[in-house]
Image (spheres, rainbow, N blue to C red):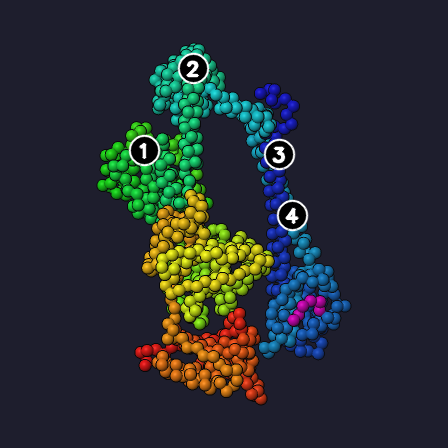
Amino acid sequence: MRSLSRNRPRSVARQVFVLQVAIVVLLAAGAVLALVLQSRHDVDREARTRSVSVAQTVAHSTGMCAALRSSDPAKTLQPLAESTRKDAGVDFIVVMDTQGIRYSHPLPDRIGKRFVGTIEPSLAGEVHTESVQGPLGREIQAVVPVYCDGKVTGLVSAGLTVKNVSGVVDRQLPVILGASAAGLALATVGAWLISRRLRRQTHGLGPEEMTRMYEHHDAVLHAVREGVLITDGGGRLLLANDEAKRLLKLPADAEGQYIGNLPGLDRTVCDLLLSGRVATDEVHEAGERLLVINQRPTRPGGGPEGAAVTIRDSTEMRVLSTRADAARRRLRLLYDAGVGVGTTLDVERTAQELADVAVPRFADFATVELAEAVLHGDEPGGTAPDLLRTGFSGISDDVPLYPRGRLIDFRASTPQARGLTTGRAELIPDLADAPGWYAQDPERAQAILDYGVHSLITAPLKARGAVLGLVNFWRSRKEEPFDEEDLSLAEELVARAGVTIDNARRYTREHALAVTLQRSLLPRDLPEQSGVEVAHFYLPAQSGVGGDWFDVIPLPGSRVALVVGDVVGHGLHAAAAMGRLRTAVLNFSSLDLPPDELLARLDDLVQYIDQGGDGGADGGLLGATCLYAVYDAVTQRCTVARAGHVPPAIVRPDGSVEIPELPAGAPLGLGGFPFESTELELPEGSQLVLYTDGLIEDRARDIDEGLDLLRAALAHADRKPEDTCRAVLAQLLPVRSRDDVALLVARTSALPADRIAEWEVPFEPSSVGAMRAHAVRKLEEWGLSELAFGTELVLSELITNAIRHGSAPVRVRLLFDRMLTCEVFDGSSSSPRLHYATTTDEGGRGLFLVAQISRRWGARYTPDGKVLWSEQTLPDPEDA
């Protein structure tokens, strides 16, 4: 202590004294300032009050009104004001008229001059006080009105100079300062006495020396790896460091207690400490520990004789070895959990893997409960949800726990419910002593206890702050209950699994969104048409939704377009890209373009999207293929073009299967490559099979083998399209495909010859009437007389346009299908268009009539010219 006190800069006592004196000085200065300010405020307020009182007394004095009305008011009012001023103790009284001209003033030369101050409030009947720079210096004055006959006829001002007001304060100041000085002196003496006592107790040490001394004391006492005890001669424990309390299992409040009364202290060690004898390296067994004890007599604090004891744990190496083994087993379990949990992105499978990895190395039984929203890919709600037991694993199957698949609503008293609320794991060492858990299902709980399950750890499954479910670990065969280290391991195991389950949940949500998006983009119900009988099938890929699509699009003239396409990739991006392409095909087909030209325009669109022309930052397509076929039920011919897509399959009426050699074309988006169309003869009853590459390609076989299997599955001509779909899927997809599969089977039909009427039209205007007559007779034959008038107008306009603006040959065709179709063929490639005719135009209104009569109308181009067509809705048979 002497060495520490040398060359000290300043002791604690000195610093405390200086601090106390500084505080007292500041308090005294603040008090003086407050008193001075309060005194000034009180004097100022008193000055204003006296000024108002004096001014009002003069204003209400007898004879004031008579003096103001006299011919020389100053002669009467000056003596009155001066005598009143001296009696009232104010510095001035000024009487004035309503213009502010003085009738009185302490300085006679100021009489007749204008008053210095504000008179407007007083003229309005108010009492006004203010501080101004007047003839006598800085003044505090009050101005009050003088009422005569209910009107303000004059004003009275009275006041004091600031110099006189300040003089009052100055006379009070010595008293205030004297009282403050006395208080400061008393406080300083008290601070000196306190610091003197403190200096004796601290031995004059400064703060740094005292801090360092206590740090050395703590370092020696608590940081050493040996236990230290100090006892007095009466057997009381005076001091015990942390290591001693740990080795001897002493309570936190052991210091100051009699050694013989300390709970948990081994009997032999207690006898040694009470004896006070010298002991050197004596070995004593205390529970599971072997302690080496040294004891020497001492006199603590100069009091009665006591003892100083040191204790060393000789079993530490054995404990460290045991802990190392436990740590290795723990790390191995966590490693196996990292490898074995989350092998798939399936939520239920991941939950079962978590239960399996914990049994039997950590627990005898493990159960996993997840919120139903998590199983569907959603985040659980804010309130505690009902949980579905999703994973279950155990050393036996006859344990009476809730079975897998059971929806469980945990009561608020159970540790599971508390874990859902607090988000913290909970340890139940003895289930028999857990009434909250028992209250969940008393009958089942008793069966669980009778089975031998005795200990439980329940831990919430969390990810990104949200509780996804619960994991419960149960012990029955292992006699020792779970402890705090097991709780820590369970928390770490569940924390890692929570991230994996959340990843699976997010994948499930994304997959569900993609499936929903794709289902909304694919056709729900195929449109009505009579050209083909269609069956379709779509299967998403095992790894996620892809970009395969199909479509059936009715075209005018008893024709139908069949489309199958494939966008590279999976997920939301592929589904969205598929929707864009399908929409584009629908729009281009409304133009009635040939298949090769339609694919060319689709290729331009994909290039535009890839180059970011639609404004999207990442809207490009990684690649797409498409096959577009148009079947004509009148000619029984099919025009096909493909862009990098697999070729279709044709099943002839005799059962033979053909995969035609079609120009492959480049995938969409490459640009610079032409597309070619091919015409195929499809007799009535043939089947046209369109599909994507996921049907025939697989890692287990090459594409030729897939085509052979497809031919074998299709070699039956007498099946319906639905049966053909099932046969193909059973043959080529025994298990779920790794890629999307789209399949479209169309069985062709032909429009009966008796529902087709066709005439060659002479290239002269006079032939229009004959064509109308032929058409009317044919409609009567078909029972469509109701449409005769409209058909005559339509044919008149279309034939006239063909003769007037087209070229020979001209041909007319009527088709009686789901609609009545009127077609006019000519050799010109110029297409008519609607335009508004002026009042002086002789023509230009015919196409408006066609548009009004027809359900829809348009034009399409052929290799020999064009076709103008119009469709009319058939009359309802029930209205006939």
Q: Residue 353: give x, y in percent of width and height.
A: 37, 39
Q: Which residue is mark 2?
A: 293
Q: Which residue sits at x=61%, y=45%?
A: 30
Instruction: Tell us which disc is closer to us: 1 or 4.
Output: 1
Q: Is residue 578 visible?
A: no
**Is mark 4 in CB contact (under 8 Å) with mark 3?**
no
Q: Which residue is mark 1?
A: 364
- Element type at mark 2: strand
Q: Which residue sits at x=45%, y=71%?
A: 556
Q: Which residue sits at x=69%, y=62%?
A: 132
Q: Give whichever of discs 4 and 3 has the lower sequence position.
A: 3
- Residue 207 against residue 642 in the figure, above or below: above
Answer few, some or many: residues within 10 Å of disc 1's Cα (few below 14, many 20 plus, some between 14 and 19).
Answer: some
- Amino acid type, callout 1: Asp
Q: Which residue is mark 4?
A: 173
Q: Is residue 799 visible?
A: yes
**Is mark 1 in CB contact (under 8 Å) with mark 3?**
no
- Amino acid type, callout 2: Ile
- Residue 496 against residue 641 in the figure, above or below: above
- Residue 10 against residue 49 in the figure, above or below: above
Magenta residues, start to end: 115-120
Q: Is residue 61 left or right of residue 220?
A: right
Q: Which residue is mark 3?
A: 18
Quadrant containing the N terminus is top right
- Element type at mark 3: helix
- Residue 728 against residue 67 in the figure, above or below: above
For the residues labelled 1 and 4, the Cα–Cα distance comes to 89 Å
